[in-house]
Image (cartoon, helix red, strand yellow):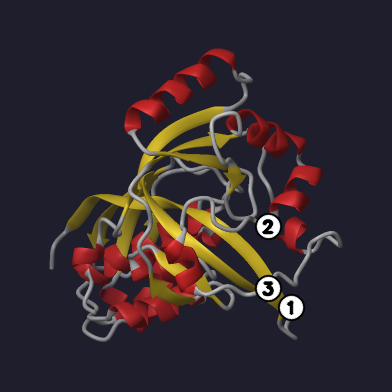
Amino acid sequence: MASSLNNCPAPAKLNLFLHVTGRRPDGYHLLQTVFQLLDHGDMLHFEARDDGTIRRVSDIAGVPEESDLVVRAAKLLREASRNRPAEQCGADIRIDKRLPMGGGLGGGSSDAATTLIALNHLWQTGLRRSELMALGLKLGADVPFFIFGRNAFAEGIGDALVPVATPDCWYVVIEPGVSVPTVAIFSDPDLTRNTKPVRILDFSDAPKNFGKNDLQVVATKLFPPVAEAIEWLGQYGDARMTGSGACVFCAFPHEQQAEEVLQELHETGPAQWKAWKARAIERHPLSHLLKS
């Protein structure tokens, strides 16, 4: 068994559109969205232990170790191990955080997915992609997408996934300096839940500027900095929010265009904003570690 696995990417995602089409009796919302992977995200490092102990060896402000999705993911996998006794499946996990919490970029979910993928390989637990996706769903609705590992048209609560081709482009992403709690958006009485369902072909035929984000109206009402970021970035194209917020993005065909907008933002935008550019990618960087 290898002793370590370092520099494991946990990429960000964007929701290129996000429609709320209904609500299940158990309260979960029915969604349609396209998930887009980016070449920007957190980085995780794993050191195997043979004593069954799982530790997070880096501090993350506001996230206690016992409630961190990364630690919970590792413990779930340890108990699901087939090829190695659980008491031998341990790890020290270090996380280099770049993605903000409450940003709609899937940071926590991506970290959890990378943990499942990396430790499944490091511990040689032998789970296939579909089995890891089932474990990931216990942690959150977005986790299976990152294990799925390809840009996807998603339905249901976000866990029914079909591969989809997306434009090869660059994105400018603004972090407007607020954290948006998902529950506040989905519980708001102004949220509409009756957008007409679309087909994957509808998106594939015209992916640029397709659809909208149904959560954006609520988020911009509750968190004005999100509205301000959309207005500023909207000068340069179709700016919209990802997920339940707070981050805002806009697509550009070439890196140079994205860089020019980024420089303008750094010179004239509010000081509390963070912004960066990232390229759209087709597959998760760790997909090669998974068995289909």
- First of labels 2, 3 by sequence position: 2
Rounded to the nearest angstrom, the CA distance separating label 2 from label 3 is 22 Å
Residue at (25, 64) in percent of width and height: 287
Q: Is residue 181 left or right of residue 259?
A: right
Look at the numbered disc 2 and give the secondary structure of its residue: helix
Q: Nearer the viewer, mark 2 or mark 3?
A: 3
Disc 3: which residue: 196
Residue 153 seen in the current view: yes
Look at the numbered disc 3 and give the secondary structure of its residue: loop
Residue at (37, 75) in percent of width and height: 77
Quadrant of the image containing the N terminus:
bottom left
- Which residue type carries mark 1? Gly
Residue 207 horizontal/vertical position (percent): 46, 57
Q: Is residue 205 left or right of residue 94?
A: right
Q: Residue furthest front?
A: 205
Residue 205 horizontal/vertical position (percent): 44, 64
Residue 64 horizontal/vertical position (percent): 56, 52
- First of labels 3, 1 by sequence position: 1
- 10 Å neighbourhood of mark 1: few (<14), some, or many (≥20)? few
- 10 Å neighbourhood of mark 3: few (<14), some, or many (≥20)? few
Along the viewing direction, whichever of 151 and 6 lies nearer the viewer: 151
Residue at (52, 56) in percent of width and height: 15
Labels 2 & 3 near each other (Cβ < 8 A): no
Disc 2: which residue: 182
Residue 67 horizontal/vertical position (percent): 56, 60
- 10 Å neighbourhood of mark 2: few (<14), some, or many (≥20)? some
Q: Residue furthest right?
A: 189
Rounded to the nearest angstrom, the CA distance separating label 2 from label 1 is 14 Å
Disc 1: which residue: 27
